[in-house]
Image: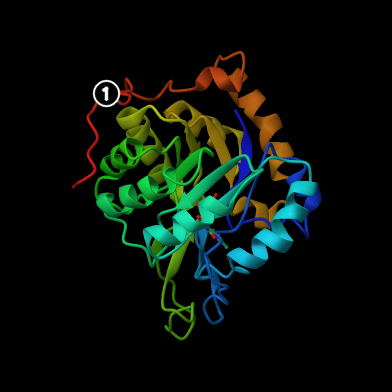
Amino acid sequence: MMLLNASGCLDAFTAPEVVRQLDGFVTKTITPLPREGNAPPRIAETAHGMLNAIGLANPGRERFLAEHLPRLLELGRPVWVSVGGFCASDYAETCAALEGIAAVELNLSCPNVDEAAESAAEIVAACRATTTLPLFAKLSAAHPDVAEVARAVASAGADGLSLINTLRAAALDRSLRPALARGGGGLSGPALKPVALYAVRACYAATGLPIVGMGGVETGRDALELVACGARHVALGTVLFADPDAPARVREELVTAARAAGLASPDDAYGLAAGPSKSLERPPSIPA
Ligand SMILES: Cc1cc2nc3c(=O)[nH]c(=O)nc-3n(C[C@H](O)[C@H](O)[C@H](O)COP(=O)(O)O)c2cc1C
């Protein structure tokens, strides 16, 4: 089992010591063109979590490849690049330009991308045609049937899934105005954990693919629960803003939590709370 950071929740250049506690570093989502992101305020605290409406601020593909990626590779940890875009060719062109990294995470769950199963599968198929790198499809639990999307991206050639992204939500300030300039944003943190457990369990049963589980992990027990639902790996997101030592702490707590559950190691929890996995026997379901 690997412990990663969740995309957008760790700046590797300002906190390389946190990256070194992880088994791999996942970048902020990269889009073809640079993006400034949304106007502030774009972060707000809520009960049991936080809201963000960063809007995929990033340096763009060209600068990322020329300046950021070489420096990230020097950190000595496997690098996962999170790829975003607004149509299948945006994603595919970035995938074609990537080499020397551990995996690609396709952010299929950003607010401006149509999340219909068909569209997610189309994007994965386009990327599959341009790269042999492992492709992890990052899905949103907001879809009425996330397992259906998981099956579609699996049939299109995804090697794994990342679950889950933030859920759209709003918070108000004292004067009853939206706390975020954009009106709403993505909810992350502990409030998300039960949703993540459900999505991981459903997608594991539907596909049997390796899953990077995330959503509200604060403790080793949280991480172990995701593993029990079928997550092969776990990513830490919002917790990193409050506790930069979380990776080392969660790793220790994972061992204790596994023992408390009567297991010899955290890996022994894999799939314990999941139903039987149907794996990939279904025929491809990409629409013509
Ligand atoms: C400030 C912030 C920025 C994020 N940026 C991205 C991003 O660029 N790409 C992406 O796929 N997910 C992004 N996410 C979502 C996280 O990767 C993760 O899926 C989500 O926060 C759930 O995990 P958590 O509850 O542990 O934070 C972001 C989350 C936060 C809080």
Q: Classify mark 1: residues with Cα within 10 Å, few (<14), some (14-19) or many (20+).
A: few
At mark 1, the secondary structure is: loop
Placement of the N terminus among the 4 image quadrants: top right
Viewer-closest of 258 and 112: 112
Look at the picture and state if 75 lies above or below 86: above
Q: Position of residue 43 (x, y in %)?
A: 56, 71
Residue at 38% from the left image edge and 47% from the top image edge: 124
Q: What x and y, as percent, mark residue 100?
A: 66, 43
Q: Can residue 216 be seen in this view?
A: no
**Residue situated furthest bottom in the rendering:** 175
Number of dots carrying numbers: 1
From the image, tell me which residue sits under label 1. 281
* Residue situated in front as seen by the camera: 151 or 228: 151
53 and 45: which one is in front? 53
Q: Position of residue 67 (x, y in %)?
A: 73, 62
Q: In this view, does 77 lie above or below 181?
A: above
Evaluate whether residue 198 shows in this view. yes
In the rendered view, does 71 fall on the left or right side of 233? right
Instruction: Identify the residue shown where x is 32% and y is 20%.
Output: 276
Front residue (pair 269, 162): 162
Q: In this view, does 22 lie above or below 242?
A: above
Q: What residue type is labelled 1?
A: Glu
Q: Label 1 CB, ligand 1: below 8 Å?
A: no
- Residue at the extreme left: 288
Q: Is 50 placed above or below 208 here? A: below
**In this rendering, would 65 be left or right of 175?**
right
Give the image location of residue 108, x and y in percent.
Answer: 40, 54
